[in-house]
Image (cartoon, helix red, strand yellow):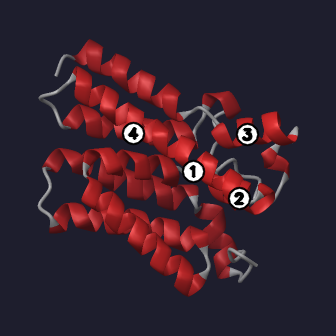
Amino acid sequence: MPAPEAMVVFIGSFLLGSIPFGYLMARMRFQTDIRQHGSQNIGATNVARTFGIRVGLVVLVLDALKGILAVMMAFVLFPHSSLVPAASGLMAMLGHVFSPFMKFKGGKGIATGLGVLSTLFWPAALIAVLCFALVVVLSRIVSVASFAAMLAALVSFWAFGQQTDFWFFGVPAVILAFWAHRNNWRRLLKGQEPRFGR
């Protein structure tokens, strides 16, 4: 793995992941700052709660595309490596959570992580989506469903015997998702976590 070229890909993936589509959507279409609404998060869930499901889905797709493009770029430039694409996906997710355009604050990284999964190993993305849907239906709590989805994807890496390099994305992604939802866990313990659709 040529280190200088890989570093360029990692930096590019981080910057790509850091594009705050939720913030930009709210600014350009609704002339408001999404950080002043709901959970004050720039992610698709808060956008959906604030402006409606359709707008939230647009942001979800755009955030997922960041992960897809980061991994695809790495696969094109490093066709014989699985480590560089996995690490590039992680960098895109980190960029979403720690966006330099938002003073190193951002979203929870779930949509971007889903985009990464769909490109690295699509069965893991499918399992994550199914797990998310099931937990949302049962609990109506998006934060719990999001973390459960990332955890399910990681388990699928093991269940399907995926190559070790993919774990360089999977394990840190689960840890990052847990950390990014830290305020949700506090609200959940207090019984104050909002339920989707209510």
Q: Residue at x 19, y 16 (%)?
A: 2
**Residue type, label 4:** Ile
Quarter of the image for the N terminus: give it: top left
Horizontal side, residue 86 vs residue 102: left or right: left
Residue 53 appears anywhere in the view: yes
* Residue on which disc 3 sits: 25
Give residue 91's position: percent from left, percent from top: 41, 35
Q: Residue at x 46, y 79 (%)?
A: 134
Give residue 107's position: percent from left, percent from top: 61, 48
Residue situated furthest front in the rendering: 54
Quadrant hosting residue 160: bottom left
Name above or below for residue 52 compared with residue 55. below
The circle drawn on residue 60 is 1
Dot 2: what SS? helix
The circle drawn on residue 8 is none
Give residue 131's position: percent from left, percent from top: 41, 73
Nearer-N-terminus badge (1/3):
3
Dot 1: what SS? helix
Q: CA distance from mark 4 to mark 2?
A: 22 Å
Horizontal side, residue 76 vs residue 147: left or right: left
Name above or below for residue 20 compared with residue 152. above
**Residue type, label 1:** Leu
* Residue on which disc 2 sits: 48
Near-viewer residue (154 or 47): 47
**Counting other residues with Cα less than 10 Å from the Cα at mark 3, is it few (<14), some (14-19), or many (20 or more)?**
many
